Image (spheres, grey):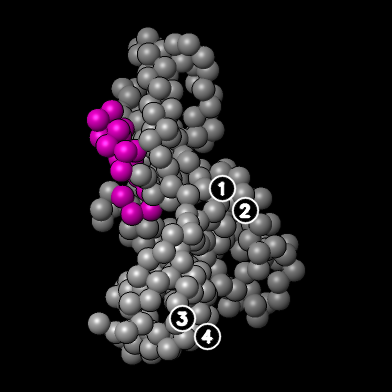
Amino acid sequence: MNRKESIDIIKSSGKKMKFSLDKLRNSLKHSGANHELVEEIVSKVNDELFEGITSNEIYNRAYSLLKKNKSVFASKYKLKKAIYELGPTGFPFERFIAAILQYSGYEVDVDIILNGACVTHEIDVIAEKNGTATLIECKFHNEEGRNCNVKIPLYIHSRYNDVKAYWVTNTNNKPLQKGWVVTNTRFTEDALTYGKCADLYLLSWDFPKDDGLKDRIDRLGLYPITVSSLLSKREKQFLLSRNVVLCRQLIKDKFYLDHLGISTERKSKILDEISELCKI
Protein backbone atom coordinates (compact mmCIF):
# COMPACT_ATOMS: atom_id res chain seq x y z
CA MET A 1 0.00 0.00 0.00
CA ASN A 2 1.15 3.52 -0.76
CA ARG A 3 2.05 5.03 2.59
CA LYS A 4 -0.17 8.03 1.87
CA GLU A 5 -3.17 5.69 1.68
CA SER A 6 -2.87 5.09 5.40
CA ILE A 7 -3.65 8.74 6.21
CA ASP A 8 -7.07 9.95 7.33
CA ILE A 9 -8.88 12.58 5.29
CA ILE A 10 -11.92 14.57 6.42
CA LYS A 11 -15.07 14.21 4.32
CA SER A 12 -17.56 17.05 3.81
CA SER A 13 -19.80 15.38 6.40
CA GLY A 14 -17.01 15.77 8.97
CA LYS A 15 -16.32 12.05 9.14
CA LYS A 16 -12.86 10.59 8.73
CA MET A 17 -11.96 8.02 6.12
CA LYS A 18 -8.80 6.49 4.70
CA PHE A 19 -7.50 8.14 1.55
CA SER A 20 -7.79 5.99 -1.58
CA LEU A 21 -5.61 6.51 -4.63
CA ASP A 22 -7.93 4.28 -6.63
CA LYS A 23 -10.96 6.47 -5.90
CA LEU A 24 -9.05 9.57 -6.99
CA ARG A 25 -7.77 7.78 -10.09
CA ASN A 26 -11.25 6.57 -11.08
CA SER A 27 -12.84 9.99 -10.65
CA LEU A 28 -10.12 11.50 -12.85
CA LYS A 29 -10.63 8.82 -15.51
CA HIS A 30 -14.33 9.68 -15.50
CA SER A 31 -13.44 13.23 -16.59
CA GLY A 32 -12.17 11.90 -19.91
CA ALA A 33 -8.49 12.61 -19.17
CA ASN A 34 -6.05 10.12 -20.70
CA HIS A 35 -3.95 7.68 -18.67
CA GLU A 36 -0.81 9.84 -18.68
CA LEU A 37 -2.62 12.94 -17.39
CA VAL A 38 -4.49 10.92 -14.76
CA GLU A 39 -1.27 9.43 -13.40
CA GLU A 40 0.48 12.81 -13.45
CA ILE A 41 -2.30 14.40 -11.37
CA VAL A 42 -2.51 11.42 -9.01
CA SER A 43 1.23 11.71 -8.40
CA LYS A 44 1.09 15.47 -7.74
CA VAL A 45 -1.90 15.23 -5.40
CA ASN A 46 -0.34 12.28 -3.58
CA ASP A 47 2.84 14.28 -2.93
CA GLU A 48 0.84 17.07 -1.29
CA LEU A 49 -1.28 14.92 1.05
CA PHE A 50 -1.08 15.27 4.81
CA GLU A 51 -2.93 13.81 7.78
CA GLY A 52 -6.33 15.47 8.22
CA ILE A 53 -6.52 17.07 4.76
CA THR A 54 -10.13 17.58 3.66
CA SER A 55 -11.66 15.84 0.67
CA ASN A 56 -12.53 19.30 -0.61
CA GLU A 57 -8.88 20.35 -0.62
CA ILE A 58 -7.98 17.21 -2.59
CA TYR A 59 -10.80 17.91 -5.04
CA ASN A 60 -9.74 21.56 -5.53
CA ARG A 61 -6.16 20.53 -6.29
CA ALA A 62 -7.20 17.88 -8.82
CA TYR A 63 -9.77 20.22 -10.39
CA SER A 64 -7.18 22.97 -10.80
CA LEU A 65 -4.74 20.60 -12.52
CA LEU A 66 -7.42 19.32 -14.88
CA LYS A 67 -8.61 22.82 -15.76
CA LYS A 68 -5.04 23.87 -16.52
CA ASN A 69 -4.83 21.04 -19.05
CA LYS A 70 -8.33 21.17 -20.60
CA SER A 71 -11.46 22.93 -19.32
CA VAL A 72 -13.86 20.21 -20.49
CA PHE A 73 -12.06 17.66 -18.28
CA ALA A 74 -12.53 19.95 -15.30
CA SER A 75 -16.21 20.40 -16.16
CA LYS A 76 -16.92 16.65 -16.14
CA TYR A 77 -14.88 16.22 -12.97
CA LYS A 78 -16.97 18.79 -11.10
CA LEU A 79 -20.36 17.31 -12.05
CA LYS A 80 -21.38 16.41 -8.51
CA LYS A 81 -20.47 19.84 -7.16
CA ALA A 82 -22.18 21.45 -10.16
CA ILE A 83 -25.47 19.86 -9.13
CA TYR A 84 -25.13 21.50 -5.69
CA GLU A 85 -24.65 24.82 -7.46
CA LEU A 86 -28.17 24.55 -8.90
CA GLY A 87 -29.37 25.86 -5.51
CA PRO A 88 -29.99 27.47 -3.14
CA THR A 89 -33.63 26.65 -4.02
CA GLY A 90 -34.66 23.27 -5.39
CA PHE A 91 -36.49 24.68 -8.42
CA PRO A 92 -33.60 24.49 -10.94
CA PHE A 93 -32.98 20.89 -9.79
CA GLU A 94 -36.62 20.04 -10.51
CA ARG A 95 -36.21 21.57 -13.98
CA PHE A 96 -33.02 19.58 -14.43
CA ILE A 97 -34.72 16.27 -13.52
CA ALA A 98 -37.62 17.11 -15.82
CA ALA A 99 -35.17 17.74 -18.68
CA ILE A 100 -33.44 14.37 -18.13
CA LEU A 101 -36.83 12.63 -18.28
CA GLN A 102 -37.86 14.62 -21.34
CA TYR A 103 -34.73 13.49 -23.20
CA SER A 104 -35.58 9.94 -22.10
CA GLY A 105 -38.89 10.07 -23.97
CA TYR A 106 -41.26 11.38 -21.30
CA GLU A 107 -43.70 14.26 -21.59
CA VAL A 108 -43.25 16.36 -18.46
CA ASP A 109 -44.91 19.10 -16.43
CA VAL A 110 -43.28 20.88 -13.50
CA ASP A 111 -44.84 22.22 -10.29
CA ILE A 112 -48.39 20.96 -10.73
CA ILE A 113 -51.12 21.27 -8.09
CA LEU A 114 -53.08 18.02 -7.72
CA ASN A 115 -56.01 17.12 -5.54
CA GLY A 116 -55.64 14.35 -3.02
CA ALA A 117 -58.39 12.52 -1.18
CA CYS A 118 -57.62 14.66 1.89
CA VAL A 119 -55.68 17.77 0.78
CA THR A 120 -54.13 19.33 -2.32
CA HIS A 121 -50.46 18.73 -3.16
CA GLU A 122 -47.83 20.55 -5.20
CA ILE A 123 -46.05 17.87 -7.22
CA ASP A 124 -42.56 18.64 -8.49
CA VAL A 125 -42.74 16.71 -11.77
CA ILE A 126 -45.40 14.71 -13.58
CA ALA A 127 -43.97 12.51 -16.34
CA GLU A 128 -46.03 10.60 -18.91
CA LYS A 129 -44.84 7.80 -21.18
CA ASN A 130 -46.41 4.74 -22.83
CA GLY A 131 -49.88 5.66 -21.63
CA THR A 132 -49.00 5.91 -17.93
CA ALA A 133 -48.21 8.77 -15.55
CA THR A 134 -45.52 9.03 -12.88
CA LEU A 135 -45.45 11.45 -9.94
CA ILE A 136 -41.93 12.57 -9.04
CA GLU A 137 -40.80 14.42 -5.94
CA CYS A 138 -37.32 15.96 -5.80
CA LYS A 139 -35.28 16.40 -2.63
CA PHE A 140 -32.46 18.84 -3.28
CA HIS A 141 -29.53 19.50 -0.94
CA ASN A 142 -27.18 22.40 -1.63
CA GLU A 143 -24.68 21.25 1.00
CA GLU A 144 -22.44 18.21 0.74
CA GLY A 145 -22.61 15.50 3.37
CA ARG A 146 -26.41 15.60 3.82
CA ASN A 147 -28.19 12.40 2.84
CA CYS A 148 -31.90 11.56 2.62
CA ASN A 149 -33.04 9.56 5.63
CA VAL A 150 -36.12 7.36 5.85
CA LYS A 151 -38.37 10.32 6.75
CA ILE A 152 -38.18 11.58 3.16
CA PRO A 153 -39.63 8.52 1.36
CA LEU A 154 -42.09 8.03 4.25
CA TYR A 155 -43.46 11.55 3.79
CA ILE A 156 -43.52 11.39 -0.01
CA HIS A 157 -45.17 7.97 -0.01
CA SER A 158 -48.04 9.28 2.12
CA ARG A 159 -48.53 12.21 -0.31
CA TYR A 160 -48.43 9.86 -3.28
CA ASN A 161 -51.10 7.64 -1.74
CA ASP A 162 -53.34 10.63 -1.04
CA VAL A 163 -53.03 11.85 -4.65
CA LYS A 164 -53.55 8.33 -5.99
CA ALA A 165 -56.73 7.86 -3.95
CA TYR A 166 -58.29 10.88 -5.71
CA TRP A 167 -56.59 10.29 -9.08
CA VAL A 168 -58.25 6.90 -9.67
CA THR A 169 -61.71 8.43 -9.26
CA ASN A 170 -61.22 10.29 -12.56
CA THR A 171 -61.58 7.82 -15.41
CA ASN A 172 -59.91 10.30 -17.82
CA ASN A 173 -56.61 10.09 -15.95
CA LYS A 174 -53.88 7.79 -17.23
CA PRO A 175 -52.93 4.89 -14.95
CA LEU A 176 -50.43 5.89 -12.25
CA GLN A 177 -47.08 4.15 -12.05
CA LYS A 178 -45.15 3.95 -8.77
CA GLY A 179 -44.06 7.24 -7.22
CA TRP A 180 -40.48 8.47 -7.57
CA VAL A 181 -38.19 10.16 -5.07
CA VAL A 182 -35.14 11.84 -6.60
CA THR A 183 -32.22 13.39 -4.74
CA ASN A 184 -28.85 14.82 -5.72
CA THR A 185 -27.18 13.18 -2.71
CA ARG A 186 -27.67 9.64 -1.36
CA PHE A 187 -30.30 7.68 0.54
CA THR A 188 -29.59 6.04 3.88
CA GLU A 189 -29.95 2.27 4.14
CA ASP A 190 -33.28 2.64 5.98
CA ALA A 191 -34.56 4.93 3.22
CA LEU A 192 -33.59 2.39 0.55
CA THR A 193 -35.20 -0.44 2.53
CA TYR A 194 -38.43 1.52 2.96
CA GLY A 195 -38.48 2.52 -0.71
CA LYS A 196 -38.23 -1.10 -1.79
CA CYS A 197 -40.90 -2.23 0.68
CA ALA A 198 -43.29 0.60 -0.28
CA ASP A 199 -42.65 0.10 -4.02
CA LEU A 200 -41.24 3.59 -4.50
CA TYR A 201 -38.64 4.21 -7.19
CA LEU A 202 -35.61 5.88 -5.58
CA LEU A 203 -33.08 7.73 -7.74
CA SER A 204 -29.98 9.28 -6.19
CA TRP A 205 -26.49 10.30 -7.23
CA ASP A 206 -25.31 6.69 -7.51
CA PHE A 207 -28.47 4.59 -7.06
CA PRO A 208 -29.69 2.39 -8.71
CA LYS A 209 -26.29 0.92 -9.50
CA ASP A 210 -25.15 1.91 -13.01
CA ASP A 211 -28.38 3.86 -13.53
CA GLY A 212 -28.06 6.61 -10.93
CA LEU A 213 -28.22 10.32 -11.64
CA LYS A 214 -24.56 10.60 -12.63
CA ASP A 215 -24.90 7.64 -15.03
CA ARG A 216 -27.97 9.13 -16.73
CA ILE A 217 -26.32 12.53 -17.10
CA ASP A 218 -23.23 11.04 -18.74
CA ARG A 219 -25.24 8.66 -20.92
CA LEU A 220 -27.50 11.41 -22.26
CA GLY A 221 -24.91 14.22 -22.27
CA LEU A 222 -27.31 16.37 -20.23
CA TYR A 223 -24.95 18.47 -18.15
CA PRO A 224 -26.18 21.42 -16.06
CA ILE A 225 -24.75 24.82 -17.05
CA THR A 226 -23.14 24.96 -13.60
CA VAL A 227 -20.47 22.47 -14.75
CA SER A 228 -18.86 25.13 -16.95
CA SER A 229 -15.40 26.07 -15.75
CA LEU A 230 -15.49 29.24 -17.87
CA LEU A 231 -18.76 30.83 -16.71
CA SER A 232 -18.66 32.89 -13.52
CA LYS A 233 -20.98 32.28 -10.58
CA ARG A 234 -22.91 35.46 -11.42
CA GLU A 235 -23.34 34.38 -15.03
CA LYS A 236 -24.58 30.94 -14.01
CA GLN A 237 -27.13 32.45 -11.63
CA PHE A 238 -28.34 34.77 -14.41
CA LEU A 239 -28.89 31.79 -16.72
CA LEU A 240 -30.63 29.74 -14.03
CA SER A 241 -32.96 32.67 -13.32
CA ARG A 242 -33.98 32.47 -17.00
CA ASN A 243 -34.62 28.71 -16.65
CA VAL A 244 -31.54 27.87 -18.70
CA VAL A 245 -30.53 24.76 -16.77
CA LEU A 246 -28.80 22.59 -19.37
CA CYS A 247 -25.69 23.20 -21.43
CA ARG A 248 -27.74 22.04 -24.43
CA GLN A 249 -30.21 24.87 -23.80
CA LEU A 250 -27.42 27.44 -23.79
CA ILE A 251 -26.09 26.11 -27.11
CA LYS A 252 -29.58 26.58 -28.55
CA ASP A 253 -30.17 30.00 -26.91
CA LYS A 254 -26.76 31.65 -27.37
CA PHE A 255 -28.32 35.11 -27.17
CA TYR A 256 -28.27 34.88 -23.35
CA LEU A 257 -24.48 35.21 -23.50
CA ASP A 258 -24.94 38.48 -25.39
CA HIS A 259 -27.24 39.73 -22.61
CA LEU A 260 -24.39 39.06 -20.21
CA GLY A 261 -22.03 41.24 -22.23
CA ILE A 262 -19.61 38.39 -22.90
CA SER A 263 -17.01 39.12 -25.56
CA THR A 264 -17.07 37.27 -28.88
CA GLU A 265 -13.80 35.48 -28.08
CA ARG A 266 -14.92 34.33 -24.63
CA LYS A 267 -18.36 33.39 -25.94
CA SER A 268 -16.68 31.15 -28.52
CA LYS A 269 -14.60 29.42 -25.82
CA ILE A 270 -17.65 28.84 -23.60
CA LEU A 271 -19.69 27.36 -26.46
CA ASP A 272 -16.76 25.18 -27.55
CA GLU A 273 -16.39 23.85 -24.01
CA ILE A 274 -20.04 22.93 -23.51
CA SER A 275 -20.45 21.61 -27.08
CA GLU A 276 -17.57 19.21 -26.53
CA LEU A 277 -19.01 18.25 -23.17
CA CYS A 278 -22.40 17.45 -24.72
CA LYS A 279 -20.71 15.86 -27.76
CA ILE A 280 -22.52 18.17 -30.15
Between 126 and 122, the residue placed more toward the observer is 122
For the point 54% across and 53% down, which residue is it?
143
Sequence-earlier tag: 2 or 3: 3
Residue 45 image offset from top left, x and y in percent: 43, 84
* Residue beneath the point at 42% across and 42% down: 148
Is residue 88 among what the camera can see? yes
Which of marks 2 and 1 precedes in the sequence? 1
Residue on which disc 3 sits: 50
Foreground: 51 or 261?
51
Residue at label 1?
Answer: 92
Local packing at callout 1 (Cα closer than 10 Å; few below 14, some 14-19, many 20+) is: many
Above or below 45: residue 137: above
Residue carrying label 4: 68
Q: Is residue 256 magenta?
A: no
Cα–Cα span, label 2 and label 4? 26 Å
C-alpha distance separating marks 1 and 4? 29 Å
Observer-side mark, 3 or 1, equals 3
Tag 1 and tag 2, C-beta contact below 8 Å: yes
Range of residues picked out in magenta: 189-207
Locate residue 17, reporting x and y percent.
37, 66
- Of labels 2 and 4, earlier in sequence is 4
Checking the image for residue 274, the label placed there is none
Which mark is drawn over residue 240? 2
Q: Secondary structure at mark 2?
A: helix
Nearest to viewer (mark 4 / mark 3)? 3
Mark 2 or 4: the one toward you: 4
Q: Residue 191: within the magenta?
A: yes
Find numbered disc 3 in the image and state the secondary structure of the residue it sits on. Answer: loop
Circles 1 and 4: CB atoms closer than 8 Å = no
